Structures are given as structure tokens and as C-alpha cells.
Amino acid sequence: MIQLDFSDEESQALHQERLSDPHPRVRRRLEALYFKSQPRPHHASGRLLDITKPTLVGYVRTAQQGGIESRKAGQCHRPQRALAPDATRIAPALQPHPPPHAGRRP
């Protein structure tokens, strides 16, 4: 497992921020980092948060590469639909077409 060294001030900051951040995913990531800053086995941190080892490793790697602030960015994976660029062109064709005798009584 990747090792991160946290100062007491950083650990206290994580403790405060994990409780106060408005975004639930950011709170979870900060909580994972806070647990990692405590002297406990790696598997215990994941078990307490009910996250997998790869998830915990991802949080730690991102924090290691970009610092704690990178975990607060709230970046979430948002895939783009394949048709998104053509939505304005396709949308009219998907609108329901009225029948030829709409509005007239047979």
C-alpha cells in the first residue's frame, strides 16, 4: 500500500474538512484520507468506510500526486453520450409526428 505522511496539522485539517464539506463524495474521500493518516492497518480503513482496496488506493494516489486539495475538487466521472454532439440535429427527428388527419374528424 502507498504510504503518505501526514503532519498533525494536516490530520486535524482532514478531520474538520471531512465533516464540513458539502459534497458527500468529497467527504468520503477526505474521510478515507483521514483514516489513512491515523496509525491503523490499511485494510481497517477500507473496512470502516466499506470501500474496496482499489478505491482506497485510488484516493491515496490522487492525494499523493495532487495533494489534499485534489481530493476536494469533487471530480466525478461523467461519461458523455455518443450522440451528445448531434443532439440538436437529432432531436427534431425524434419528436412525435402527428397523424395526417390530426385535428380533423374522420
Image (spheres, rainbow, N blue to C red):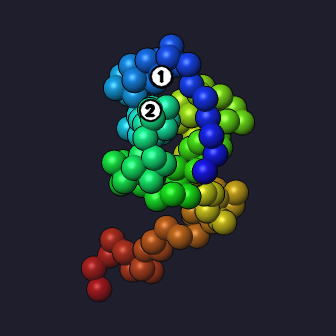
The vertical placement of 9 against 75, above or below, is above
Q: Where is residue 92 in the image (x, y as percent from the top left)?
A: 57, 63
Residue 30's place in the image compared with 95, above or below, is: above
For residue 35, side relative to residue 63 (left or right) = left
What residue sits right under mark 2 in the picture?
Answer: 38
Name the residue that disc number 1 marks: 11
Percent position of residue 26, x then y: 46, 35
- Give how far across and how far down residue 40 sits, in percent: 43, 41
* Residue kind at label 1, given as amino acid type: Ser
Q: Is residue 90 above or below residue 33?
A: below
Q: Which of marks 1 and 2 is nearer the N terminus?
A: 1
Q: Where is residue 3 in the image (x, y as percent from the top left)?
A: 62, 40
25 vs 67: above or below: below
Name the residue located 49 percent from the left edge and 67 percent from the top edge. Answer: 95
Instruction: State left or right for residue 79 relative to residue 28.
Output: right
For label 1, the SS is helix
Q: Residue at x 33, y 71 (%)?
A: 103
Query: Which element carries disc 2, helix, strand or loop?
Result: loop
x 44%, y 32%: residue: 38
Q: How crowded is mark 2: few (under 14 residues within 10 Å), some or many (20 or more)?
A: some
Left or right placement of residue 62 versus residue 41 in this view: right
Image quadrant occupied by the C terminus: bottom left
Residue at x 45%, y 35% (from the top left corner)? 39
Q: Residues within 10 Å of mark 1 (few under 14, many from 20)?
A: some
Who is closer to the viewer here, 21 or 10?
A: 10
